[in-house]
Amino acid sequence: MIREHDQLTMATLTSELAEVQAQLDLALHDHLYSPFRELAQSQLGRIQPLRRAAVVLATAADGTDSALLRQQRIDLATALEMLNIALVIHQLLLANSANQTDNPNQRSITGSVILTGDYCFTRSALFAAKTDNVQVVEIFSQTLKTISEGILRGLFAERGDVTVAPAEVFHTELALCEAGVVGAATLVRTTSSLSDAAVAELLAILRRWVPGWQMQEVTPAFEHLPPPQEAGWQVLQQWIQLR
């Protein structure tokens, strides 16, 4: 369903999130075999609610909504959620690294985790490519690189590596949501009034919300946004507060 007057409502956000969920379910259920399927689906449950997707859907709107833009934003939203699943799965490797033994069962579990995570990484890239937007794919690729580097810096810091300079805590959730805003803005940039200043304002709001998803003192900033994003982010705020 195309958004009426290009305005995001709670009903249309819920509907589009359901489509993201359906694409994730299909990718994990129909293309993975047991026990990989169960492992991936368990992590899908852990990443609920789909906040990364909701950020994309609230941002990717222009003055004349179309079936093409609708599918692009749903595919981008799915890509970021699938990437999040892959990252969560690979975190299991780090959590289990201290328990590594020569036990064949442990090696089998580790292999399953690696294969499942790699599959999810691949699927996330394919969903990004489905947007058929080169810039979006580049943003997705750079986001994966940034997150990987942030996780590695955190690991070295935890182990007391003196060669790693002190840095702010890296938040994967924030990096994914920022990519969602920039990617969504790229999808609508040629047909909307979403300026660089408006994108910067959205990113500033995100940094106040994430990682704790605190909603205080951000509503006034919405009125400086183009109407589609103002409406979308008001709905996004309401949706998050209900979760």
Image (cartoon, rainbow, N blue to C red):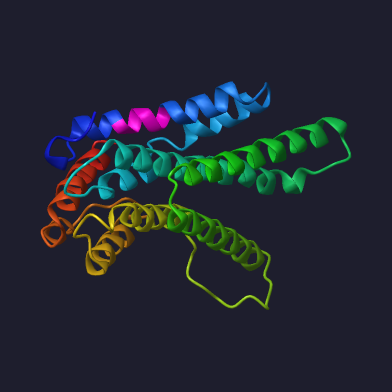
Q: Main secondary structure of the magenta part?
A: helix
Q: Which of the pair 26/35 is nearer the observer?
A: 26
Answer left or right for 46 relative to 114. left
**Range drawn in magenta:** 16-21
The part of the image, by quadrant, that contains residue 13 is: top left
Answer left or right for 205 relative to 234. right
Instruction: Count every numbered label the image shows and give the total.
Output: 0
Answer left or right for 72 relative to 110. left
Is residue 211 visible in this depiction of the protein? no
Q: Which of the pair 130/225 is nearer the observer?
A: 130
Residue 193 magenta: no
Where residue 104 sits: x, y (%)? 87, 32
- Which residue appears at 87% of the width and 35% of the height? 103
Residue 20 magenta: yes
Where residue 119 sits: x, y (%)? 64, 38
- Which residue appears at 64% of the width and 45% of the height? 90
- Which residue appears at 75% of the width and 38% of the height? 110
Q: Is residue 223 above or below residue 213?
A: below
Where residue 49 sits: x, y (%)? 37, 36
The part of the image, by quadrant, that contains residue 165 is: bottom right
